Image (cartoon, helix red, strand yellow):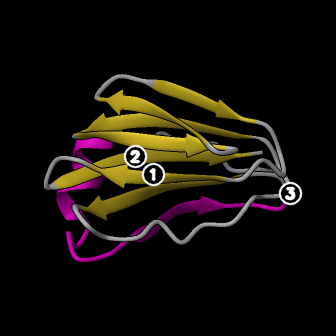
Amino acid sequence: MSNPKIFDIDTFLSKIPTSQYFIDVMNTSTMEIGIINLKKEQEDTQQPHISDEIYYVVSGNGTIEIDGIKKEVNSGKIIYIPKRIPHSFHANSNELVILYILA
């Protein structure tokens, strides 16, 4: 039997160490949810994933490079990345905070 969960993003973000790069929120056999906390000049080291992904930019601004094409991103943007597509973020502000969902 599964256990439904409700998360409050503001409460969750206030409790995480700002020094962490990847923060897992939930990891099941079919889904992974977490936060990317990318600092300016920090390299985004993620590799293409074997599942589709949704990203939601919580705060900050920067760029995402998707299969060699760069696009500007900022708070409120939702990004869909199909599985196995190379991508990476770059923070233009001091910090770029992104919620991710892999399923």
Q: Secondary structure at mark 3?
A: loop
In the rendered structure, which disc, 3 or 1, sits on the residue that comes first in sequence?
3
- Residue farthest to the left, as pictured: 94
Q: CA distance from mark 1 to mark 2?
A: 9 Å
Q: CA distance from mark 3 to mark 1?
A: 18 Å
Q: From the image, which quarter does the C terminus lie in?
A: top right
Q: Is residue 23 magenta?
A: yes
Quarter of the figure with residue 49: bottom right
Q: Which mark is residue 43?
A: none
Left or right: residue 95 versus residue 100 is: left
Disc 1 secondary structure class? strand
Which residue lies at the image location 13% right of the left edge and 55% below the top edge? 94
The tally of labels here is: 3
Q: Left or right? Give the position of 57 relative to 81.
A: left
Local crowd size for mark 3, using a 10 Å CA cut-off: few (<14), some (14–19), many (≥20): few
Residue located at (46% from left, 66% from top): 44
Name the residue located 37 percent from the left edge and 31 percent from the top edge.
Answer: 73
Q: CA distance from mark 2 to mark 3?
A: 19 Å
Per the image, the residue denoted by label 2 is 98
Identify which amino acid the numbered label 3 is placed on: Ile
The stretch in magenta equals: 9-29
Query: Is residue 15 placed above or below 91 in the rendered structure?
Result: below
Does dot 2 land on a helix, a strand or a loop? strand
Is residue 80 visible to the viewer in this orientation of the structure?
yes
Q: Disc 1 designates what residue?
A: 89
Q: Characterize the local packing of mark 2: few (<14), some (14-19) or many (20 or more) Cα atoms within 10 angstroms.
A: many
